[in-house]
Image (cartoon, grey):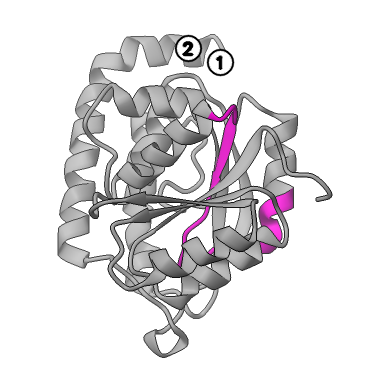
Amino acid sequence: MSTPSRTHLILIPTYNTGGKVLQTVWDARRIWRPVWVVVDGSTDGTLEALQALSREDPDIRVLAMPRNQGKGAAILHGLREAEAAGYTHAMTLDADGQHPTDKILEFMATSTANPEALILGLPVFDASAPRVRVHGRKISNWCTGLETLGAGIGDSLYGFRVYPIAPLREIMERQPWMRRFDFDAEAAVRLCWRGVRPINLAAPVKYFRPEEGGVSHFRYLRDNVLLTWMHVRLILEGLVRLPFLLGRRLAGR
């Protein structure tokens, strides 16, 4: 792009992802401007490296959180700052290099053409994907389909997305959840409840081994317990919302 976007930015939350975050920021910046990074209490020296990068490039901005609070909390911090600066949409991109930066333009163009919509990445897995995680996410996807009465969330956990900032920020500020690994799925469900239409676009996902610089903070037991509790909450709340959701579905909205 010749000039930075005044409506859409890239938002990258990061926590102790090592050199991968620098490469991710650089790859994204070559395609889109601006790129904002929210450093969620990292202790691996990447904050200083990113700040040095931002001093050389005015289209890279670094926001620093004093302690680790979780992916959702970091994104909420970035959304508040972005909205205050006049931006209307944010693409979230994981710092570990798993998301395809060559799909940024397609996703941003789709969002620009459909500003009221939530643009969701539909992951295309290769041989690097852990089978347990590929199959395990099917449970979460089934739950989100139930919670939204099949509103069209193709994948509940893939964080490569473009969000309309205002409705997501308002949703997050009204309740205490969505601050950690539960962010991606709950954000999609609650936006659908609000009437935000999802659009799914296929996007490859790459898992890196530790020897390739891959860093994962996913903890199987802890995070699956968190997801289970999240879906229990959403199903119960969905029952309360059921008459409204059914009415909207019957009306074709």
Q: Nearer the viewer, residue 176 or 196?
A: 176
Few, some or many residues within 10 Å of mark 2 (<14, 14–19, 20+)? few
Report x, y in % for residue 217.
28, 67
- Which residue is denoted by mark 1 in the rendering? 253
Residue projecting furthest to the bottom: 211
Residue contact between numbered discs 2 and 1, judged by CB atoms under 8 Å: yes
Asked whether residue 60 appears in the rendered view, the answer is yes
Q: Is residue 202 left or right of residue 79?
A: right
Quadrant position of residue 57: bottom right
Q: Is residue 155 left or right of residue 228?
A: right
Front-most of residues 176 and 128: 176
Give residue 191's position: percent from left, percent from top.
44, 27
- Residue 145 in sight: no
In this picture, which residue range is highlighted in magenta? 85-105
Residue that numbered label 2 is attached to: 248
- The answer to whether 183 is drawn above or below residue 148 in the figure is below
Q: Which mark is residue 207?
A: none
Residue appearing at x 28%, y 23% in the figure: 238
Mark 2: amino acid: Arg
Q: From this viewpoint, which residue is outermost toward the right?
A: 2
Query: Which of these two is toward me, 79 or 109?
Result: 79
- Residue 104 at x, y percent in the picture: 67, 53
As for residue 99 lying within the magenta part, the answer is: yes
Residue 207 point in image, percent of width and height: 46, 74
Q: Quadrant of residue 197?
A: top right
Considering depth in this image, is 146 or 95 the residue closer to the camera? Answer: 95
Q: Quadrant of residue 236?
A: top left
Q: CA distance from mark 2 to mark 1?
A: 5 Å
> Which residue sits at x=52%, y=55%?
93
Residue 113 as seen in the image, left or right of residue 231? right
Name the kind of residue labelled 1 in the image.
Arg
